[in-house]
Amino acid sequence: MNNTVDIEFVPDENYIYPNVTIRAKEKTKLVENIIHAVENVSEDQFSSVSAYDGSEVILLSQRDIIRARSYDHRVVVQTEAGSYLVKKTLIALEEVLDPKRFLRISHSELVNLYKIRSFDLNIRGSIAIRFENGDTSWASRRYLRSIREFLK
């Protein structure tokens, strides 16, 4: 396995913040490690999310969150490891999450854009969101315009 990485810096006045693009034949462990390294450096400005697993408090990295949903007056955050209760409203949670990473797709759900495998736009105008872990969510009609704007 070849672990060499070609790195190139291209100055561009159109970017205020750095933009990192990784080009590779497939998403390998090396690519995952590079993504995590870049996220760890840039994550300092976004706090971890306090969540509860029973009586235990867990600090979740924003990059580990797949989605956050509210139902029955509770907010639950889903990760690969499981689902955890958050003692904040979805609006309060949205305020601490990175707006470049999380997108509201309905009144009751936020999704991590980095955990999405695909957007399925069907003929009726609805959007199915398929995650890397195989789960699917549906965007509500109210948020279709903002999602389409984001996808452009």
Image (cartoon, grey):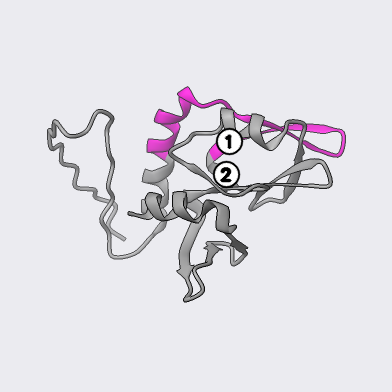
Q: Is residue 38 left or right of residue 7?
A: right
The crowd level at tag 1 (other Cα within 10 Å; few <14, some 14-19, many 20+) is: some
Which residue is at a point 47% across and 50% down the rendered structure image? 113
What are the residue bounds of the magenta stretch? 37-62
Which circle marks residue 34 in the picture? none
Q: Residue at x 59, y 34 (%)?
A: 94
Q: Is residue 60 above or below residue 111?
A: above
Q: CA distance from mark 2 to mark 1?
A: 5 Å
Residue 15 vertical position relative to residue 119 in the rendered view, above or below: above
Of residues 90 and 141, the one drawn nearer to the viewer in this rendering:
141
User: Which residue lies under the disc numbered 1?
Assistant: 61
Q: Quadrant of the N terminus?
A: bottom left
State the image quarter where residue 40 is shown.
top left
Residue 148 on the magenta segment: no
Question: Residue 35: image x %, image y %?
Answer: 39, 45
For residue 57, side relative to residue 93 (left or right): right
Along the line of sight, the residue nearer the viewer: 60 or 144: 144
Q: Which residue is mark 2?
A: 64
Q: Quadrant of the C terminus?
A: bottom left
Q: Position of residue 8 (x, y in %)?
A: 15, 41
Callout 1: helix, strand or loop? loop
C-beta proximity under 8 Å, tags 2 and 1: yes
Q: Is residue 42 above or below residue 82?
A: above
Q: Position of residue 78 (x, y in %)?
A: 67, 49
All told, the count of numbered labels is 2
Side (left or right) of 56 relative to 108: right
Percent position (x, y) of residue 79? Answer: 64, 49
Q: Amino acid at mark 1?
A: Ser
Q: From this viewpoint, which residue is outermost toward the bottom?
A: 123
Residue type at the position of mark 2: Asp
* Callout 2 secondary element: helix
Q: Quadrant of residue 60?
A: top right
